[in-house]
Image (spheres, helix red, strand yellow):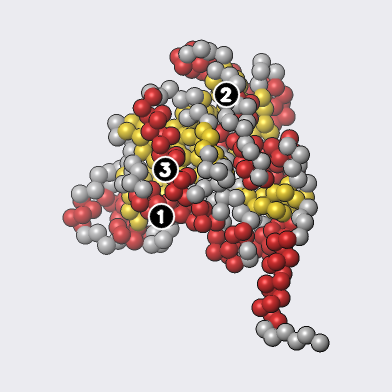
Amino acid sequence: MLRIKNSNKISICILKEIINNQDKPYTIGIIGGGQLALMLTEAAKERGIKVCVQTKSRNDPGGIKADSVIEADALQIKGNKKLIQQSEKIIFENEWIKVDKLKQIGAKNFSIPSLDSLSPLVDRISQKKFIDRLNLPSPKWTTIQELKKFKNKNIDNLKFPLMAKTFKGGYDGKGNKKIKSKEELELFISQSSTEEWIVEEWVEFEKELAIVGSRDIKGKIRLFPIVETFQSNKVCHWVLSPAEINHEINLFAFNIFSSIVNELDYLGVICIEFFFGKSGLLVNEIAPRTHNSGHFSIEACNSSQFDQHICISSGLNPPDIKMNCNGSLMINLLGLRKNYPMKIEDRINKLSEISEANIHWYNKSKENFGRKMGHITFLLKGTSQEKRLVEAEKIIEEVTLIWPSPHD
């Protein structure tokens, strides 16, 4: 009879080996179940790829069309383990994950992008340090911890206003605070945890731009056209593609994108957001995932951002990206106030009557104020940027009569 010492260690090794080698029922597992997971699942279905989603409820947007749902919070490790056991590859709806814990349960071998690629991007401080290390142009910044060491003279030399941002988890304008004076800064510092916020210089910009693209296993980069995003109370209201920028700025953005994904050895889809103005092109934030500014690609391109990510994650060769129209307009449908006179069903019906409207509804359970409930995309026919902008403004006027921005 064979006797084995250290049976616990061996059994763990054997379990990992079984997980690595067993046939799994789902090609892709998605951690998170919001609208991005929904559109990833839709893209997977078009390619005949089976998907399992980990989310709190199978009624969440990402659970509706998934082949299987693990009902657990995206950060629950027990749920992550089950997803890994059932899925060949793991992808993430957003970057706010627990990298160390995922590595401990063996997710490092299955995740797209890799956990090592994600590590520098999961919070704003590590992102800022990564951007600085590559010597890329971006707003000057510091931490609250460093500001607390400043003497009064140093604070007097600061130029106001400043922008404070949460260390982790902020999106759609949440977790941002404008600081207008020395007195406001001192009060803010006294009330803030040393790890909760960073503070950036205030940027006066002419445009907010974004570029979404992918990098595959062979290191080939594919890029969607750079878009211009238009905000309403710090939340993206609409996106125009392509953006009106000159060749030099276009090339510079492409070079920044290439530098970032190559340095990270990144796999999958990623978005980089920029400010553009008197200071030139500045990197605002990096989102290592599919992104709201790339939703136009579902109708406007031969391969959407979701299709690119699914192809790369499942080992398929993604198509080279081409726009199949002159331009596009994507409008976010944001939740309105409770007493808004027109019901959701009536708004959707009226929007569907607009010529050539492509409506994407996320099936969220509640219409909370400012919440992304869906989006609507139009392909533009104008042969010049000026003509497309006029066309877009007419469409925006027609859409907002039915579904206005909640912040207007």
| In the displayed structure image, the side of residue 260 where residue 314 appears, left or right | right
Viewer-proximal residue among 313 and 129: 313
Label 2, secondary structure: give it. loop
How far apart, in angstroms, are the residues tagged by discs 3 and 1?
19 Å
**Residue at image coords 32%, 33%:** 280
Residue 168 visible to an observer of this rendering: no
- Are discs 1 and 2 less than 8 Å apart at CB? no
Query: In the figure, 341 relative to 19: above or below?
Result: above
The image shows residue 83 at horizontal and vertical percentages of: 71, 57
Residue sitting nearer the eye, 185 or 357: 357
Residue at image x 70%, y 66%?
17
Name the disc covering residue 323, or none. 2
Crowding at dot 1, Cα within 10 Å, few <14 / some 14-19 / many 20+, comes out as many
Residue located beneath label 1 in the image: 125
Report the Cα–Cα distance between label 1 and label 2: 35 Å
Q: Amino acid at mark 2?
A: Met
Q: Amino acid at mark 3?
A: Ser
Q: Position of residue 333 (x, y in %)?
A: 60, 32
Amino acid at circle 1: Ile
Residue lying at 71% horizontally and 76% vertically, measured from the top left:
11
Vertical arrangement, residue 30 with respect to residue 370, above or below: below
In the image as oriented, which residue stretches furthest toward the right? 1
**Sequence-wise first label, 3 or 1:** 1
Asked if residue 168 is positioned above or below residue 320 in the image, the reply reads below
Q: Which residue is denoted by mark 3 in the rendering?
A: 259
Label 1 SS: helix
Q: Position of residue 393 (x, y in %)?
A: 51, 18
Give the side of residue 146 with respect to residue 97, left or right.
left
Q: Quadrant of the N terminus?
A: bottom right
Tell us which disc is closer to us: 1 or 2.
2
In percent of width and height, residue 93 lies at 61, 47
